[in-house]
Image (cartoon, grey):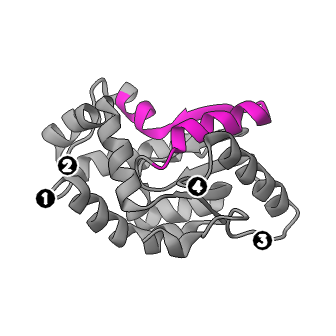
């Protein structure tokens, strides 16, 4: 069975924070796909979008995911839109255990506004921007996240440490061939839209 834990979900759900905790507890490496992409490109995601458009960014994202999914004993925090391309979903599904981190649009918007780096590094993806963008994109992506996830964890109600614990418990269950779809006490995928 693959030695990878892959975190998916909208930006602001805590993929990088929780992913670092999961990796530390497993004694594995951690990779933030967005940071990896920025490092390889030598510029921010916003700059890649500005010079290459969304299609160019998504091409780079797919290449990064392919590279990362070739490594073993790795926890990967994907970008929020990594699930948009069917080939990425196929790759991620076959690469390891996929945990979907969720939170409500209002909480995500609050988290994004509280992170000054997020606005500088990432462009708006809809003309509306703001909370309307979060709602619109989350509604479009939720079915894709749900299709791909082995497990869903509502980070709105859990601390990063508790979310990491829940993911590791679900991963251990998954490794035995059982299925665990959501954090105990959390509402799971249906509450994320």
Q: Nearer the viewer, mark 4 or mark 2?
A: 4
Q: Nearer the viewer, mark 1 or mark 4?
A: 4
Q: Are marks 3 and 4 in contact (CB under 8 Å)?
A: no
Q: Tag 4: Cα neighbours inside 10 Å, few (<14), some, or many (≥20)?
A: some
Residue that label 2 marks: 124
Find out whether residue 142 is within the magenta segment. Answer: no
**Secondary element type, mark 4:** loop
* Dot label at residue 187: none
> Quarter of the image holding residue 95?
bottom right
Q: What is the CA distance from the residue labelled 3 to the residue labelled 2?
A: 36 Å
Magenta residues (range): 13-38
Does the image show residue 72? yes
Q: Tag 2: Cα neighbours inside 10 Å, few (<14), some, or many (≥20)?
A: few
Residue lying furthest left: 127
**Secondary element type, mark 2:** loop
Dominant secondary structure (helix, strand or loop) of the stretch shown in magenta: helix
Q: What is the CA distance from the residue labelled 1 to the residue labelled 4?
A: 28 Å
Sequence-wise first label, 1 or 3: 1
Q: What is the CA distance from the residue labelled 4 to the residue labelled 2?
A: 27 Å
Residue that label 1 marks: 128
Question: Residue, x 42% and y 55% (percent of image)?
Answer: 10
Q: Tag 3: Cα neighbours inside 10 Å, few (<14), some, or many (≥20)?
A: some
Residue that label 4 marks: 157
* Whether residue 4 is situated above or below residue 191 in the rendered picture: above
> Quarter of the image holding residue 112?
top left
| Quarter of the image with the C terminus in it | bottom left
Q: Are marks 2 and 1 in contact (CB under 8 Å)?
A: yes
**Secondary element type, mark 3:** loop
Sequence-wise first label, 3 or 4: 4
């Amino acid at each position: 069975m693959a030695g990878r834990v892959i975190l998916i979900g909208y930006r602001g759900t805590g993929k990088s924070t929780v992913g670092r905790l999961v990796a530390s507890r497993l004694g594995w490496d951690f990779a933030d796909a967005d940071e990896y992409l920025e490092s390889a490109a030598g510029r921010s995601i916003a700059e890649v979008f500005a010079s290459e458009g969304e299609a160019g960014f998504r091409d780079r994202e797919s290449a990064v995911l392919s590279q990362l999914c070739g490594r073993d004993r790795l926890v990967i925090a994907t970008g929020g839109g990594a699930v948009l391309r069917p080939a990425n979903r196929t790759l991620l599904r076959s690469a390891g255990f996929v945990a979907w981190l969720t939170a409500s649009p209002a909480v995500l918007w609050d988290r994004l506004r509280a992170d000054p780096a997020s606005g500088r590094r990432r462009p708006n993806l809809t003309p509306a921007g703001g909370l309307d963008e979060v709602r619109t994109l989350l509604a479009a992506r939720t079915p894709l996240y749900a299709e791909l996830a082995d497990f869903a964890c509502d980070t709105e109600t859990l601390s990063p440490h508790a979310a990491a614990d829940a993911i590791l418990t679900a991963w251990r269950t998954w490794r035995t061939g059982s299925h665990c779809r959501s954090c105990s006490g959390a509402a799971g995928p249906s509450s994320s839209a």
